[in-house]
Amino acid sequence: MMMGCVMTDALDHLEKSEVTQGNAILNTLQEFAGAVGTSTTAAFVAFAQRKAGSKGAIPTAHGTHLAYIFLLVLVLIIIAIFVKYTQVRNKND
């Protein structure tokens, strides 16, 4: 939801001749981040299934719960970084 705003802000800091390259880099990073997130979530589910010795519904649900907690913590860290960045940027303006 906020990727468009982040991209707009990031591209505003580039020279006009660098905007196309910056856009390509940001799109590539977005795809890469999605792949890493999917792989990480799948790894948590597989870990829980392997630990339980089964691929049933309960180990899968446990792995999904672990992945959700991990991603929630990651999102909270990212939000904290954005808040800190915004506060520093507002002080400088």
Image (cartoon, grey):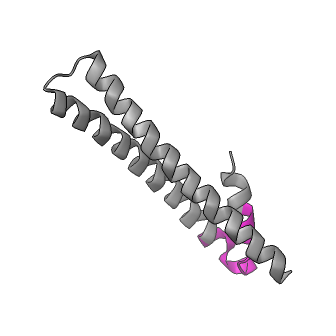
Q: Is residue 93 magenta?
A: no
- On the image, the x and y values in percent for residue 29 come to 50, 60
Viewer can see residue 10: no
Q: Main secondary structure of the magenta part?
A: helix
Name the quarter where the N terminus is drawn: top right
Q: Name the residue located 82 percent from the left edge and 83 percent from the top edge.
A: 92
Q: Name the residue located 63 percent from the left edge and 56 percent from the top edge.
A: 79
Q: Which residues are magenta?
A: 8-21
Q: Name the residue located 42 percent from the left edge and 47 percent from the top edge.
A: 37
- On the image, the x and y values in percent for residue 59 come to 26, 24
Image position of 32 (left or right of 52):
right
Looking at the picture, tell me which residue is in the foreground, 20 or 84: 84
Q: Tell me if residue 56 comes above or below residue 90 in the rendering.
A: above
Residue farthest to the top, as pictured: 57
Q: Tell me if residue 85 comes above or below residue 64 in the rendering.
A: below
Viewer can see residue 73: yes
- On the image, the x and y values in percent for residue 60 come to 30, 25
